Image (cartoon, grey):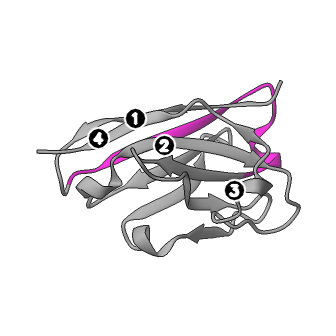
Amino acid sequence: QVQPVESGGGLVQPGGSLRLSCAASGFTLETYAIGWFRLAPGEEREGVSCISKYDDNTYYVDSVKGRFTISRGDAKKTVYLQMNSLKPEDTAVYFCAASLRPRGCDPRALHEFEYWGQGTQVTVSS
């Protein structure tokens, strides 16, 4: 069973940083494009960032450009989302998801991500 597993959420003050991790259960992470998404109270789930498979091209939505960085690490067994300069509006449950898309990825194309994790809560508050 293909199951992404998120970790690293928590409570942080505005301006602070967190690093989220996405690991694989039942599949090889590097053979999938991986995306990060978030769901805030009263909002629809939205894409944040994604990294393509094999060539590791990265993509970000405008609201996080310059603040968030997606990368593969740990011999490509983990995908990280480094979040800096966090704002209260970044508060949400963050999900990672896996896509079989052969080239590139688009964090706005939620329907292209077939396998989803359970999410990890990120709260930005003073």
Residue labelled with disc 1: 121
Instruction: Name above or below for residue 26 compared with residue 116.
Output: above
Of the two numbered discs 3 and 2 on the same chain, state the one appearing first in sequence. Answer: 2
Front residue (pair 106, 18): 106
- Residue kind at label 2, given as amino acid type: Tyr
User: Considering the numbered disc 3 on the image, is that residue within a helix, a strand or a loop?
Assistant: helix
Q: Residue furthest right?
A: 102
Residue name at image x 69 percent, y 56 percent: 110
Q: Residue furthest front?
A: 42
Residue labelled with disc 4: 123
Disc 3 crowd rating (10 Å Cα; few below 14, some 14-19, many 20+) is some
Q: Residue 94 got which mark?
A: 2
Of the two numbered discs 4 and 3 on the same chain, state the one appearing first in sequence. Answer: 3
Residue name at image x 79 percent, y 56 percent: 112
- Residue kind at label 3, given as amino acid type: Leu
Residue name at image x 56 percent, y 61 percent: 49
Task: Pinpoint residue 103: horizontal percent, then vertical percent.
Answer: 84, 67
Instruction: Name above or below for residue 8 compared with residue 71.
Output: above
Instruction: Name above or below for residue 84 compared with residue 26.
Output: below
Residue labelled with disc 3: 110
Residue 97 forms part of the magenta stretch? no
Front residue (pair 114, 57): 114
Cα–Cα span, label 4 and label 3: 23 Å
Region in magenta:
16-33
Asked whether, in this view, residue 125 is left or right of residue 17, the answer is left
